[in-house]
């Protein structure tokens, strides 16, 4: 006689077994813990009752699975796993101690927030707390590095989709010394203004050369990037509130053609307070281009915006005309603006916002040594 075939439940659906006593046993296997198998089980008087209880056990399994997942989706839990990973990698004791300290600080700041819910806002809140504790620059950057490596590991383990500290990635090595930031001195700044002012007053042509006084003053006050300055349109300027809004920037398309596009990050969109004097300088340009072009710095030849190459060429002429012989790029004006704010003790969060950085960590990575220098001078003043 052919053997009777019975349908086996797929693995994970659970099992229903009739016992010698006549009762029915139901069992659902859970995920193993430390290699040990676990089950949820119950008994019933009839198969019908057993089926109902099996459904309940399966729901309980899902609930327990969610509970376990919630317990594992914490900074504390995954932090301990990560520390064991570092130990397995035979990292030094100082690295493990520092990492443990950083993870504890992160957990305190997150205040029970799930690991997967940590955002750049959470990180910035913590970095502000560190800044207020007056950590040394080396300590600050060391902590940031440990934090960055932890979140990179979390991404590799598929615990999170994206690191909230991606903006802290190390920059490629270059020939320049680490943290080299070259700025204009006050005396050099005055020489540049003295060179550009006559061109402005006499409406010296070409047009960008004449407009450059207003453009330079705006760059010096705001620290805006070159592309952001040249993409400014009249709707970005509020001459009543004395503010300039960054809404667009210049970039290269796939054919290496300069185009107007949007800032790469949300932090790039920002509104910056400027002086009334600079507002008036910009407003005096309006009759030249408003009816012909929406751009503040109007390129009459192309009836459009100026390309960055033209700005850089004009800046080189300006720098040499002002007698500044040392190499100094236009981007250095942005660094000068940042260092001026630091020495005026502008809050780090406001500096980050005005510069359009994605994180306080970015500001600290670039200007940490200036922040430290400023802090040391401040301490020297108050010592007996």
Image (tube, rainbow, N blue to C red):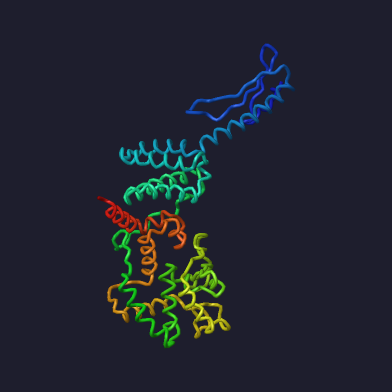
- Number of marks in the image? 0
Q: Residue 383 at what x, y percent from top left? A: 26, 51
Q: Which quadrant of the rendered structure holds the N terminus?
A: top right
Seen in the picture, residue 177 relative to 333 is either above or below; the reply is: above
**Residue 64, quarter of the rendered image:** top right
**Residue lying furthest front in this view?**
384
Residue at left 55%, top 36%?
70
Q: Nearer the viewer, residue 350 or 356?
A: 350
Quadrant in the rendering for residue 61: top right
Q: Is residue 286 left or right of residue 339?
A: right
Q: Nearer the viewer, residue 18 or 382?
A: 382
Question: Which residue is at 67% across, 22% downward?
Answer: 16
Q: Position of residue 332 (x, y in %)?
A: 36, 68
Q: Nearer the viewer, residue 294 or 174?
A: 294
22 over 130 or under it: above or below:
above
Judge by depth and name the residue closer to the eye, 39 or 219: 219
x%, y% of residue 367?
A: 36, 59
Kindly indicate the quadrant of the structure image that contains residue 211. Answer: bottom left
Question: What is the residue that sits farthest to the left in this orientation?
Answer: 384
Q: Is residue 293 left or right of residue 16?
A: left
Q: Position of residue 281 (x, y in %)?
A: 47, 78
Q: Is residue 148 above or below residue 184?
A: above
């Amino acid at each position: 006689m052919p053997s009777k075939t019975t349908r086996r439940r797929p693995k994970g659906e659970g099992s229903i077994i009739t016992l010698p006593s006549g009762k029915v046993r139901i069992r659902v296997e859970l995920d193993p813990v430390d290699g040990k198998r676990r089950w949820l089980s119950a008994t019933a008087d009839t198969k019908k009752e057993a089926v109902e209880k099996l459904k309940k056990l399966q729901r309980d399994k899902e609930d327990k699975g969610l509970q376990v997942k919630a317990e594992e989706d914490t900074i504390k839990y995954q932090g301990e796993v990560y520390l064991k990973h570092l130990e397995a990698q035979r990292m030094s004791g100082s690295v493990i101690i520092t990492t443990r300290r950083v993870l504890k600080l992160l957990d305190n700041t997150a205040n029970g927030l799930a690991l997967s819910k940590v955002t750049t806002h959470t990180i910035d809140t913590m970095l502000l707390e560190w800044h207020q504790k007056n950590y040394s620059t080396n300590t600050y950057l060391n902590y940031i590095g440990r934090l960055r490596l932890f979140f990179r590991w979390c991404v590799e383990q598929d615990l999170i989709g994206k690191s909230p500290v991606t903006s802290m990635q190390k920059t490629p090595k270059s020939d320049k010394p680490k943290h080299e930031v070259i700025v204009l001195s006050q005396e050099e700044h005055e020489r540049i203004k003295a060179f550009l002012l006559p061109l402005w007053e006499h409406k010296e042509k070409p047009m960008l050369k004449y407009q450059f006084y207003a453009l330079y003053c705006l760059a010096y006050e705001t620290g805006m990037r070159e592309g952001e300055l040249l993409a400014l349109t009249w709707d970005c300027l509020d001459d009543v509130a004395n503010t300039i809004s960054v809404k667009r920037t210049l970039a290269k398309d796939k054919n290496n053609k300069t185009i107007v596009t949007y800032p790469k990050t949300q932090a790039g969109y920002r509104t910056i307070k400027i002086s009334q004097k600079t507002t008036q300088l910009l407003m005096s340009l309006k009759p030249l281009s408003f009816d012909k072009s929406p751009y503040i710095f109007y390129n009459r030849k192309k009836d459009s915006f100026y390309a960055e190459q033209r700005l850089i060429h004009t800046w080189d002429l300006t720098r040499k005309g002002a007698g500044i012989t040392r190499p100094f790029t236009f981007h250095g004006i942005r660094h000068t603006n940042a260092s001026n704010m630091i020495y005026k003790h502008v809050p780090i969060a406001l500096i980050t916002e005005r510069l359009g950085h994605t994180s306080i960590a970015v500001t600290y990575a670039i200007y940490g040594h200036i922040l430290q220098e400023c802090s040391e001078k401040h301490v020297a003043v108050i010592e007996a």
